[in-house]
Amino acid sequence: MSNARVDSLHLHEQHGERPRQVTEAAGTVGGGLIGDSHGNRPARAVLVVDRTTHDALGLTPGDLREQITVTGLSGVTTLAPGTEVRIGGLTLRVNGECEPCTHIGEMNGRADVEAFRTSLEHRRGALCTVVAVDGPVRVGDPVEVLVAA
């Protein structure tokens, strides 16, 4: 049994702006979170990042533009494509690792955006698509890897 939990939820509502922290979010099958600007981009609908990445780099949840920040699943970035993860009332399918870009360093005000990009390699999180909805996802909800690909 995993101790993994939802640490923080964010909706990325507008390009170039910091995501808005929320306590609950609903999902759409074949997409992402309702109200999120990535929600209808199936391959990049939901970004899930483990809190250890934030802690290691002096970041706070939302800084990596993730929708779901979890604790207790430090290997989330390296889950194989096709793996299913239940997060609260949502089941997500992992599409692959989120490749870090220099843009994320710019958004976080880093002087050396390339060094910041390098520090995020294999830590930026998993890009996912919602495949089932049984209810919303809430801060504090359990996180469980269901099907390993």
Image (cartoon, rainbow, N blue to C red):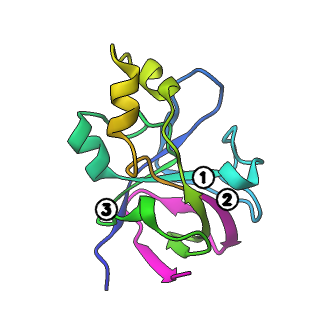
- Rendered residue at 60%/52% (across/down): 46
- Rendered residue at 29%/66% (across/down): 72
How far, Cα to Cα, is label 2 from label 3? 23 Å
Residue 56 visible, this orientation: yes
Is 38 placed left or right of 55 in the picture? right
Residue underneath mark 2: 27
Callout 3 amino acid: Ser
Quadrant location of the N terminus in the rendered image: bottom left
Residue underneath mark 3: 74
Callout 2 amino acid: Gly
Compare residues 54 and 61 and report the one nearer the observer. 54
> Within the magenta stretch, is there residue 143?
yes
Is 55 placed left or right of 121 in the picture? left
Residue 106, compared with residue 101, is above or below; it is above
Is 14 placed left or right of 126 in the picture? right
Asked if the residue under mark 2 is in contact with the one under mark 1, i.e. CB atoms within 8 Å, the reply is yes
Residue underneath mark 1: 46
Highlighted magenta segment, given as a residue range: 128-149
Is 109 placed left or right of 146 in the picture? left
Compare residues 22 and 45 and report the one nearer the observer. 45
Residue 14 image label = none
